[in-house]
Image (cartoon, rainbow, N blue to C red):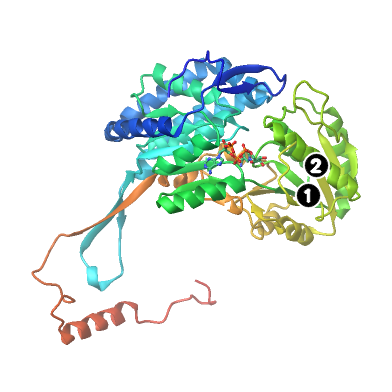
């Protein structure tokens, strides 16, 4: 939906760092959304028929546009989200890389795949799968990363031959509108990528009409989206909340572990689904880690503003609850005086799992740190959560860290790194438990936007197959003997009983 940025009514978009209203966007009705989806459906047929090379050329134009307009994109993200400019640059880098990555990989990841079978009933058939775009992908994006998490999901969907209708967060719609303008300036076909602005009603209308829903946001709304998608029998992919743990092992490089904690907890004001939300430190290095962490918290600058107004109360409640239950605040602890929405970087110790800050998603610049007897206790506590998005382990013995990673109930683990996996587009990223369904990135991150068609070709058709009606017992004895000959032997497990 194209709209000039001169509205004075509709949804007001403010700058979280200053409180000033920067623009207004319209609230798309259910009829507007249905119209956009119908337009997308018409455009999708031509888009899907374009060769991958032709789509790659349009992606290349967009990639170059992003680079040449990077300052405008960064300014737009910063103005509506309140994050530091450096953090917005990361979003531009992601967008540029994603256009290059999906243009290059889509043909191979979506190509026909030959299938072989062990069944004697279909010997000699040529079988393969082919992938067909789902049609119109509806994306509902969050406010924490207005380009990465919203438009970023559109790129593989488009690379797979779908049209996209994106509903950005009502708090940060300007970047998505700028991306829509980009596609026009790059000569993309009309209707292939559209933006509808609005809140819950607009989102519900999109879930009611699109052929696939990609949702990023809270677990509560994710459940409602999945329920509606289930009623309509359309697929959905959900990237929801997290309560990511950092485990600091006794052999960790403490300076790096501290930097992982500071960056992981405070970048973008801690408003990342992959933020480090809690730390477990082996007792032997606890004092050294906490002392250095406290020094670093005192020095850190460029922590973003709180984009989503109610988030300030959530963060305040979690800090107050922890303090009431016996936690010590080693740094920060309060909301800023305004006019912007800021919360001080806050370091909490003497915390335990009775406190909301260790169990519920805080989504703010806070870091509770807990001493544990050993790595086993750290793993047990890390798994004591309804969420299962990511975890980080800091430790020099990477073999041991990998063994511990295998015990963690999360979709992604980084060892001696934090959040960097998100930039590796070949690596799937998605949550277990209440953190989501499905993944973005990796082969599944683009294949999910397709329907699978299975084709079986009998190249040497006889008049009648052995198993066909009318049944002949002799044919079935022959079939059974064939199965016994092929599959009737004991399994081979090698010399030591291993496969
Ligand atoms: P929500 O998940 O609650 O909402 C996301 C968007 O979906 C909003 O525009 C919302 O509209 C809309 N919506 C509400 N109900 C439906 C529905 N049934 N179908 C379709 N769309 C719907 O996120 P919020 O932005 O309100 O943030 C709440 C919490 O979510 C945060 O405090 C944070 O914990 C978490 N969050 C997680 C993110 C992540 O990256 N995983 C990103 C952002 C937030 P409306 O505002 O009218 O309800």
Residue 86, by quadrant, is top right
Residue 147, by quadrant, is top right
On residue 356, the disc is 1
Element marked by disc 1 = helix
Q: Is residue 456 visible?
A: yes
Residue 226 higher or lower than 24, as above or below: below
Q: Position of residue 263 (x, y in %)?
A: 73, 35
Left or right of 198? Residue 132 is: left
Q: Are marks 1 and 2 in contact (CB under 8 Å)?
A: yes
Residue lying at 39% horizontally and 34% vertically, measured from the top left: 34
Q: Is residue 289 visible?
A: no
Furthest residue to the top?
6
Q: Quadrant of ligand 1?
A: top right
Left or right of 81? Residue 371 is: right
Left or right of 238? Residue 40 is: left
Residue lying at 15% horizontally and 60% vertically, measured from the top left: 459
Question: Dividing the image into 4 quarters, which one contains the N terminus?
Answer: top left
Q: Nearer the viewer, mark 1 or mark 2?
A: 2
Q: Position of residue 494 (x, y in %)?
A: 49, 75
Q: Nearer the N terminus, badge 1 or badge 2?
A: 2
Element marked by disc 2 = helix
Residue lying at 58% horizontally and 35% vertically, measured from the top left: 142
Q: Nearer the viewer, residue 473 or 325?
A: 325
Q: Provide the residue designation for mark 2.
A: 317
């Amino acid at each position: 939906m194209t709209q000039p940025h001169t509205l004075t009514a509709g949804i007001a978009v403010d700058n979280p760092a200053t409180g000033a209203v920067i623009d207004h966007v319209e609230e798309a009705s259910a009829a507007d959304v249905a119209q956009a989806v119908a337009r997308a459906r018409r455009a999708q047929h031509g888009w899907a028929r374009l060769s991958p090379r032709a789509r790659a050329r349009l992606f290349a134009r967009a990639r170059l546009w992003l680079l040449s307009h990077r300052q405008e994109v960064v300014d737009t993200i910063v103005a509506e989200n309140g994050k530091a400019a450096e953090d917005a640059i990361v979003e531009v880098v992601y967008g540029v890389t994603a256009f290059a990555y999906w243009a290059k990989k889509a043909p191979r990841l979506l190509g026909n795949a030959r299938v072989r079978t062990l069944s004697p009933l279909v010997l000699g058939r040529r079988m393969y799968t082919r992938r067909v775009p789902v049609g119109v992908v509806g994306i509902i994006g969050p406010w924490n990363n207005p380009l990465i998490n919203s438009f970023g999901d559109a790129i593989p969907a488009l690379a797979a031959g779908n049209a996209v209708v994106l509903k950005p967060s009502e708090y940060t719609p300007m970047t998505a509108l700028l991306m829509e303008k980009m596609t026009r300036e790059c000569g993309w076909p009309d209707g292939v990528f559209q933006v509808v602005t609005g809140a819950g009603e607009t989102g519900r209308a999109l879930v009611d009409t699109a052929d696939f829903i990609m949702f990023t946001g809270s677990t509560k709304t994710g459940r409602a989206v999945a329920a509606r998608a289930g009623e309509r029998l359309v697929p959905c992919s959900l990237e929801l909340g997290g309560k990511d743990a950092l485990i600091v092992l006794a052999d960790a490089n403490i300076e790096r572990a501290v930097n992982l904690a500071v960056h992981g907890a405070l970048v973008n004001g801690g408003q990342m689904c992959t933020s480090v939300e809690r730390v477990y430190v082996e007792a032997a290095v606890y004092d050294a880690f906490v002392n250095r962490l406290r020094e670093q918290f005192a020095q850190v600058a460029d922590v973003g503003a709180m984009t989503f107004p109610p988030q300030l109360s959530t963060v305040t409640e979690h800090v107050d609850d922890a303090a009431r239950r016996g936690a010590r605040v080693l740094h920060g602890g309060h909301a800023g005086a305004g006019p912007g929405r800021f919360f001080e970087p806050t370091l909490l110790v003497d915390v335990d799992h009775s406190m909301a800050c260790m169990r519920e998603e805080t989504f703010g610049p806070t870091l509770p740190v807990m001493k544990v007897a050993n790595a086993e206790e750290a793993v047990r506590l890390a798994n004591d959560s309804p969420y299962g998005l990511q975890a980080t382990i800091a430790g020099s013995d990477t073999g041991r860290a990998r063994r511990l990673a295998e015990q963690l109930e999360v979709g992604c683990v980084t060892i001696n790194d934090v959040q960097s996996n998100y930039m590796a587009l070949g690596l799937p990223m998605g949550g277990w438990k209440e953190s989501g369904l499905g993944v973005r990135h990796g082969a599944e991150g683009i294949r999910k936007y397709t329907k699978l068609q299975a084709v079986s070709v009998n190249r040497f058709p006889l008049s009648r197959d052995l198993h066909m009606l009318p049944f002949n017992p002799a044919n079935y004895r022959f079939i059974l003997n064939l199965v016994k000959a092929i599959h009737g032997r004991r399994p081979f497990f090698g010399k030591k009983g291993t496969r």
